[in-house]
Image (cartoon, grey):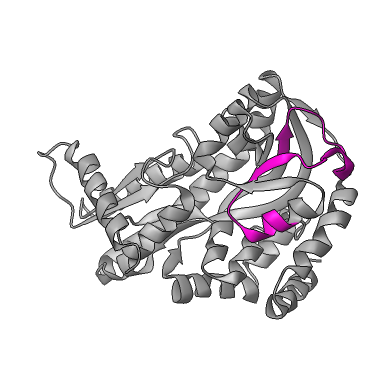
């Protein structure tokens, strides 16, 4: 296998992590390791910790979950590869899954959805179920539900009200083709980069801007290195909490039932945290000195939507057209 040597080295590092834990604690039958890109105060991390508590309590200690924040174990794309290789077990992702199955692009596509109502329609549609099925069958990773993300907005150190203001602004984007296509089409210079590298890159001037939901902007402390929060709302998306399919299938039936029920409760718990946090975090960002900028959303859509559509394969263009019908 191409990545065997790398995964062996990472396995040794993980063993070092685990060796630091108490040797007196009883060993669970099934130990899961989850890699988070967010810090401990983010709703996703809190939801996974809650999930771990449910697993341990309801299985009588037979299952245990260790949650590592801030990409301590691996960056997002590498975490997906490690899950597929069986080195780690869980993470949260969406657009990065496009690297393994093209249909995943619709879970996190610029200019596709107009609001969260449309998002819910897509998730619950036949296409939404196809996305989940392909994750399992083509990628070998099982979705445990979905987490809300909120709209993604652009941050910068000069106001951006219209695509004309971009002028090849160097913007960090996730490692997903649709993001690169969209921002390039509207006049920016998109640069794929791991989330954990964004703050230092903004600080050093390697990149000039980035785009994320409100909660991620606060969680990463971007208000310290970015002045303007431009309300582009260019993506309405969700994130999938994920577990390796092989890892899940190793569980006996009684533990699978506990696992799946706990996952449902984790999703509901995260949704509550998200709604409670969403309005507060905007006030926190304003209090931290960020200036909110109203933009010409239609201009962004007109410049970017066509380019994203044309970048898709003919099969995926048909799916795109169907999504537009579903989400009207």
Q: Examine the rendered structure and indicate whether residue 71 appears above or below residue 87.
A: above
Q: Residue shown at 81%/66% (left/top)?
A: 328
Q: Is residue 306 left or right of residue 263?
A: right
Q: Residue shown at 26%/51% (left/top)?
A: 9
The span shown in magenta is: 154-181
Tell me where residue 324 appears, x and y as whole percent. 78, 69
Q: Answer with the quarter of the image where residue 263 lies.
A: bottom left
In this view of the protein, which residue sits in the foreground, 184 or 30?
184
Q: Answer with the quarter of the image where residue 22 lies.
A: top left
Q: Is residue 150 on the magenta stretch?
A: no
Tell me where residue 282 appears, x and y as whole percent. 69, 30
Q: Is residue 283 left or right of residue 247?
A: right
Q: Residue shown at 65%/72% (left/top)?
A: 125
Q: Residue shown at 37%/49% (left/top)?
A: 34
In this view of the protein, which residue sits in the foreground, 261 or 177?
177
Tell me where residue 296 appears, x and y as whole percent. 89, 43
Q: Examine the rendered structure and indicate whether residue 318 appears above or below residue 132.
A: below
Q: Is residue 178 on the magenta stretch?
A: yes
Observer able to see residue 190: yes
Placement of the N terminus among the 4 image quadrants: bottom left
Q: Examine the rendered structure and indicate whether residue 290 appears above or below residue 4.
A: above
Q: Examine the rendered structure and indicate whether residue 214 appears above or below residue 93.
A: above
Observer able to see residue 94: no
In this view of the protein, which residue sits in the foreground, 299 or 250?
299
Tell me where residue 230 appears, x and y as whole percent. 78, 35
In this view of the protein, which residue sits in the foreground, 215 or 190?
190
């Amino acid at each position: 296998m191409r990545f065997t040597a790398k995964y062996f080295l990472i396995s040794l590092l993980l063993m070092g992590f685990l060796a630091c834990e108490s040797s007196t604690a009883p060993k669970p039958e099934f130990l899961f390791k989850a890699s988070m890109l967010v810090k401990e105060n983010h709703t996703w991390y809190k939801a996974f910790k809650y999930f771990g508590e449910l697993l341990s309590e309801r299985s009588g200690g037979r299952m245990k979950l260790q949650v590592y924040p801030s990409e301590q174990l691996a960056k997002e794309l590498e975490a997906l590869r490690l899950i597929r290789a069986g080195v780690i077990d869980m993470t949260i992702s969406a657009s990065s899954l496009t690297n393994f199955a093209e249909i995943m692009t619709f879970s996190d596509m610029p200019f596709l959805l107009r609001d969260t109502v449309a998002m819910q329609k897509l998730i619950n549609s036949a296409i939404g179920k196809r996305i989940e099925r392909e994750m399992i069958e083509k990628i070998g990773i099982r979705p445990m539900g979905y987490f809300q993300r909120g709209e993604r907005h652009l941050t910068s150190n000069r106001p951006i009200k219209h695509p004309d203001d971009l002028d090849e602004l160097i913007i960090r984007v996730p490692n997903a083709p649709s993001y690169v296509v969209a921002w390039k089409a509207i006049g920016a210079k998109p640069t794929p980069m791991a989330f954990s590298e964004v703050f230092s890159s903004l600080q050093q001037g390697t990149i000039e801007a980035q785009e994320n939901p409100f909660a991620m902007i606060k969680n990463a402390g971007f208000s310290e290195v970015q002045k303007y929060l431009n309300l582009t709302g260019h993506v309405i998306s969700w994130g999938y909490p994920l577990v390796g399919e092989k890892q899940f299938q190793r569980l006996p039936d009684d533990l699978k039932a506990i696992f799946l029920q706990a996952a449902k409760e984790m999703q509901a718990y995260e949704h509550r945290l998200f709604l409670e946090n969403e309005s507060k975090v905007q006030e926190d960002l304003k209090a931290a000195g960020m200036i909110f900028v109203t933009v010409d959303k239609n201009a962004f859509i007109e410049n970017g939507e066509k380019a994203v559509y044309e970048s898709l394969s003919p099969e995926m263009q048909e799916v795109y057209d169907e999504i537009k019908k579903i989400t009207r």
